Image (spheres, helix red, strand yellow):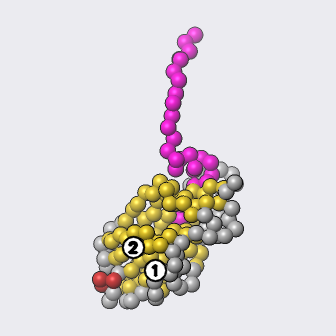
């Protein structure tokens, strides 16, 4: 009887490994409206009592129509407006039963005035109408309880135009020992 003597070595991407462990989540904030002198934002917020560190993996800004836009990325900032919580989140691993529930909150607000306060404006991206901004952070942005990763949308060059869009995130949660 023939028995293969192959030894396998497999490299598993970190995002797949975290999904297999039930720690990877995806979600988005839809119908974010801004323009006419207002802004919109969405963020991954790590509540103070979460017991996990947040690892931001990927983010996208899409479906912005009518206007060029600016996306400011802020770490641990306090955004203007009243946060709403998105229910459009799920575990990336749909084979688990029961499905894991995220401890991180995906919050958003539309048509806000003012700028984020506190925290750090880490970087800025610009986009054109009908384009998608995507950045794969591979989990390198890490936030302890009380921290947040915020994307703040505005259209300062064409403030007279109304705009809308969507912000999506992929992240994993690592328990704090």
Task: Read off the magenta span.
Answer: 1-28
Q: Nearer the viewer, residue 78 or 27?
A: 78
Q: Label 1 to label 2, Cα distance in Å? A: 10 Å
Quadrant assignment for the N terminus: top right
Q: Does the segment drawn in magenta span residue 23?
A: yes
Which badge, 1 or 2, is on the more N-terminal residue?
1
Instruction: Give the structural element (helix, strand or loop) at label 2.
Output: strand
Quadrant assignment, res 62: bottom left
- The answer to whether residue 151 shows anywhere in this view is no
Vertical order, 97 against 43 (above or below):
above
Residue 86 in the image: state x and y as whole percent: 57, 72
Query: At 65% from the left edge and 64% from the top edge, which residue is drawn?
Result: 103
Query: At 63% from the left edge and 52% from the top edge, which residue is drawn?
Result: 22
Looking at the image, residue 69 sits to the left or right of residue 106; the answer is: left
Vertical order, 5 against 30 (above or below):
above
Q: Nearer the viewer, mark 1 or mark 2?
A: 2
Tally of marks: 2
Residue matched to label 2:
71
Residue matched to label 1:
40
Instruction: Give the structural element (helix, strand or loop) at label 1.
Output: strand
Quadrant assignment for the C terminus: bottom right
Q: Nearer the viewer, residue 75 or 103?
A: 75
Q: Does the segment drawn in magenta span residue 4?
A: yes
- The answer to whether residue 118 shows anywhere in this view is yes
Query: At 65% from the left edge and 50% from the top edge, which residue is drawn?
Result: 96
Vertical order, 54 against 83 (above or below):
above
């Amino acid at each position: 009887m023939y028995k293969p003597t192959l030894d396998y070595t497999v490299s598993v991407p970190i995002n797949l490994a975290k999904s297999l462990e039930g720690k990877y989540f995806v979600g988005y904030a839809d119908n974010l409206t801004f323009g006419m002198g207002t802004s919109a934002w969405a963020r991954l917020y790590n509540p103070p009592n979460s017991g996990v560190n947040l690892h931001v993996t990927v983010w996208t800004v899409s479906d912005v129509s009518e206007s060029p836009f600016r996306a400011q990325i802020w770490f641990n900032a306090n955004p203007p407006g009243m946060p709403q919580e998105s229910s459009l989140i799920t575990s990336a691993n749909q084979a688990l039963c029961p499905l894991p529930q995220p401890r991180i909150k995906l919050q958003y607000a539309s048509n806000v005035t003012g700028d984020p306060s506190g925290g750090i404006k880490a970087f800025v991206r610009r986009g054109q109408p009908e384009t998608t901004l995507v950045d794969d952070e591979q989990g390198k942005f890490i936030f302890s309880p009380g921290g947040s990763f915020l994307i703040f949308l505005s259209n300062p060059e064409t403030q007279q135009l109304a705009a809308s869009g969507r912000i999506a995130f992929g992240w994993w949660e690592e328990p704090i020992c």
